[in-house]
Amino acid sequence: MHPRGLENRHSAPNGEEMPSVPLHARPASHHRDGKLSNNLYSEQTETVAAVANIVPLSAVAQQPVSSKPQRLKTLYTPEERIRRDATKWTLVQGILAPVQFVVFLVSLALVVRYLREGEGFFTASVSIVIKTLLLYAIMITGSIWEREVFGCYLFAPAFFWEDVFSFLVLALHTAYLVALLGGIGEPRQQMLLALTAYASYVVNATQFILKLRAARRDERVALSSAASVAGSRG
């Protein structure tokens, strides 16, 4: 006989056979009213659905963490750094910049001497002209350098404000040349105009020096990061 068909039969003490009880009979529900059980189940389901509709899924869902590392903002991208090191105009800029600064120091001394003593006007004027010509040269070659490295002749994002101020420096130096060649103003006024141009040049040179230091800092950080990665792999 199949196990599911087995029944448990007991005999009463007086010999009478007790009614058989199925071995696998299901227990009766503890709810007296079937409708009450159904109602409770329906109310719980509706409550959960209501909460799910109130709370948006985006409020509880966690955003996936990006596996790509965040790149720090640097003065040069790796590609721009390669182009900077490859172009010959980087060397030209590296030569002209200190030469112009030396000429500036000599010319500044001559201009101050004339303003204090009233002597050496011609020598001071020649020094200012040489300084101005070097400024033109470094502006022209610098624009070519920016074209080689950043793809635009001027106002590259990395040197935007430096280029803007360079035009002010160039305008003041050009104004001195116009005054000198056109005989505009007295010699002392021309020298004061030259001093104003030199003051703007100092500010502009400071801008570029700060950018040079930033570029060197970026390179040190890049080298240390590469060394850390190589050490971790080793």
Image (cartoon, grey):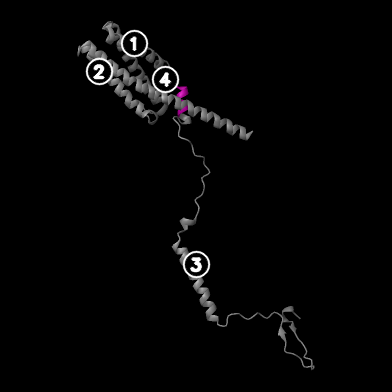
The picture quadrant where one finds residue 74 is: top left
Left or right: 75 with respect to 197? right
Mark 1 vs mark 4: in front: 1
Earlier along the polypeptide chain: callout 3 or callout 2? 3
Which residue is identified by label 2? Answer: 175
Foreground residue among 46 and 187: 187
In the image, which disc is placed on residue 89? 4
Q: Quadrant of the N terminus?
A: bottom right
Residue at 40% from the left image edge and 17% from the top image edge: 97
Foreground residue among 42 and 4: 42
Task: Give residue 157's position: percent from left, percent from top.
Answer: 38, 31
Residue at 33% from the left image edge and 20% from the top image edge: 201
Q: Is residue 85 magenta?
A: yes
How far apart marks 4 and 3 lie (CA) works out to 71 Å
In the image, which disc is placed on residue 188? none
Q: What element carries label 2?
A: helix
Mark 4 vs mark 3: in front: 3
Earlier along the polypeptide chain: callout 1 or callout 4? 4
Residue at 49% from the left image edge and 56% from the top image edge: 60
Q: In which quarter of the image is the C terminus?
A: top right
